[in-house]
Amino acid sequence: MKLILTGTTGFVGQEVLTQALAHPSITSVVALTRHPIPATFASNPKVKNVLVEDFSTYTPSVLEQLSGADACIWCIGAKSTNPNITRKVTLDYALAGVNAFSQLPKPESQNFRFVFTSGILAVREGKPIYFPYAKESRRLGGEAETKLEEFGKGHGGLDVHIMRPSGVTAKDRSLLNSLSATFAPMIRVNELAAAMIDVAVNGGGSKTWENRDLVSRGREVLAGKK
């Protein structure tokens, strides 16, 4: 299986890359980045690092290197407080990516899987925002979820999966995080990565994955039950 991965410099993306390289079904990982990935990853024969200057445009050279890919795990997230940058990264980049990847050559009998990392705080249109924190970016997250799902429904041969994790913690939680997890939903980064990779490799009935679904699937994968 050939996997496209974005956001490999982030907390979640780096764990996804680490697990993907160890996954027996994944034979190739194409890491799309603006800057070269660390040598510890680049030296792995499974990895191909393709530099992308602008994630809103995919050149023929880049698309050629993505040909034959079976799935993408999208881990790019906006960290800016500028609403224009947040919209560009959260919404525009994701839509440009799924549009480009949906046109890649692939076997007719197999759908391309686009696994999008969103979050539990993303709010779709028509839904109330109960907490006033980061209202605009949360609405943008919800808009991205909706438009990606609509794109998937309108394009045959494409499965879009929306991942909505809650608080993502390290594998080994601190005492504070462990206590917090008793009051609020959380997920360990290795559980999230395992769940996303399993969906990319094997698919799944659900198109929107809430935190509890991700925890359950991630733990099953890590325990060797899937």
Image: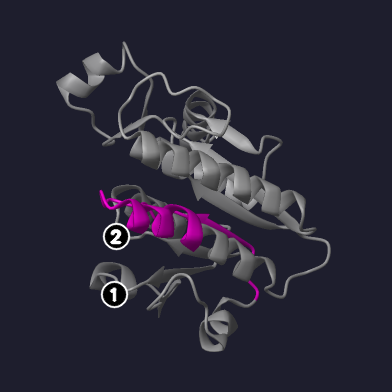
Residue drawn at the location 54% of the way across and 27% of the way down: 213
Q: Is the N terminus in the top left, top right, bottom left or bottom right quadrant?
A: bottom right
Q: Which residue is mark 1?
A: 35
Tell me, yes or no, if residue 105 can be seen here: yes
Quadrant of residue 103 within the rendered picture: bottom right
Report the span colored magenta: 68-93
Give the image location of residue 128, x and y in percent.
Answer: 49, 22
Q: Residues within 10 Å of mark 1 (few under 14, many from 20)?
A: few
Q: Foreground residue, 82 or 222?
A: 82
Secondary element under disc 2, as helix, strand or loop, is: loop
Give the image location of residue 79, x and y in percent.
Answer: 28, 50
Q: What amino acid type should be assigned to the residue bearing mark 2?
A: Thr
The answer to the question of whether label 1 and label 2 lie on touching residues, with beta carbons closer than 8 A, is yes
Quadrant of residue 51 within the rendered picture: bottom left
Q: Which residue is mark 2?
A: 9
Secondary element under disc 1, as helix, strand or loop, is: loop
In the displayed structure, 3 sits above or below 212; it is below
